[in-house]
Amino acid sequence: MSALKKPFQLGDLELPSNVFCAPLAGCSDLPFRRMTSKYQPGLIYCEMVKMEALIRNDPNTFQLLEYETGMHPIGGQICGSQPKIAGQCAKIIEDLGFDVVDFNCGCPVDKITKDGSGSGLLKTPELIGEILVNMIAAVKIPVTVKIRAGWDDESINAVEITHIVKKAGAKAICVHGRTREQGYRGPANWDHIKACKEVADQMMVIGNGDIVDALSAKRMFDYTGCDAILLSRGTFGQPWIIEDIYNLLEKKPVKFRSGLDSRDCLLEHFAHVLTYRSERKAVLEMRRIGCWYLKQAVGVKSFREALNRSQSTEEIGQLLQSFPWEEMAFNSQIEMEEV
């Protein structure tokens, strides 16, 4: 059985803890990472970038890799299916100052899998090993890999890939408990994570999928025996989940988060977005981000609608300030069991 480790060793790299924050494509931008990094996760990732775009020096790709000194330790994640350029791309990530480089074999979206990248690589496990060997040979920083349980229920091969990744020399494998076919639907099957841990030997196994609060983080550790956890969508609208997990696993009180806590955090997130995005992009992003902070709230339909109709950041600011956050009720308040 594994548990919270502070500090946590990943190869030769010492991390503050074994609670990590995922590279969420289209979501974990610089403002998002400012919000999560303040709660001191063990490792935080930038958004996934394509190997081919790195080689082309695509400016939009390099914007995705922007980070601040206070965000260390920080990881960069690459995706692609060409072994010949994998080492060069890993070296670019290392030269940009990243502490870890991760190889994505889990992204389920069609535009990534259509050329055999992301979770498309689950169909060609040996190619994963070939790409990793090239990456590891090119850099001194730890190389990790993220996979899913398999392409579909008829081709579960996470354990097979764990053996391949281990042989290639990766320092850790992150296993998401869903198949590519599932996407993000249905429950994550943690049995696959547990099975990978049982064959990983000295390689670290990171558990991912359905960690939505401190209690589910504890259950992930307890059930799978994983060495670390990767928080993904559970960070949406509650960046403090990291602090909650630390407190629960250290047998400290887990703070009740009120509507006012959501307001303060959302206003801070809004301020970061304003400094980073154009007016139009800030409006579009805040329509989505605002709903993250309301996802557990009840009786907020009209407020959501007003937020989604907003046409300016000034209008959004007025909405956020005028909403009666202190009266906000939640669907349920999860009670933490004894640990």
Image (tube, grey):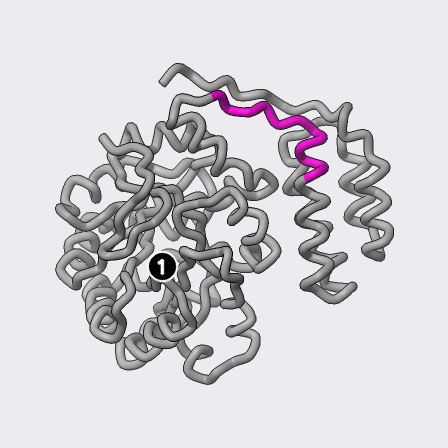
Q: Determine the residue positioned at 24% across, 65% down.
A: 128
* 56 in relation to 119, above or below: below
- Tell me the residue at 21%/73% (across/down): 137
Residue segment shown in magenta: 253-264
Q: Secondary structure at mark 1?
A: helix
The image quadrant that residue 207 belongs to is top left
Picture coordinates of residue 67, whole percent (x, y) = 52, 63
Q: Residues within 10 Å of mark 1 (few under 14, many from 20)?
A: many
- Check if residue 256 falls in the magenta segment: yes
Q: Which residue is located at x 44 percent, y 38 percent?
A: 186
**Amino acid type, residue under disc 1 in the picture:** Ser
The residue lying toward the viewer, choosing from 31 and 130, is: 31
**Quadrant assignment, res 284:** bottom right
* Residue 69 placement (x, y as % from top left): 50, 61
* Residue 221 % position (x, y): 31, 33
Using the rendered image of the protein, determine whether residue 140 is visible from the camera's viewpoint. Answer: yes
Considering depth in this image, is 166 or 91 the residue closer to the camera?
A: 91
Q: Which residue is mark 1?
A: 119
How many numbered marks are there? 1
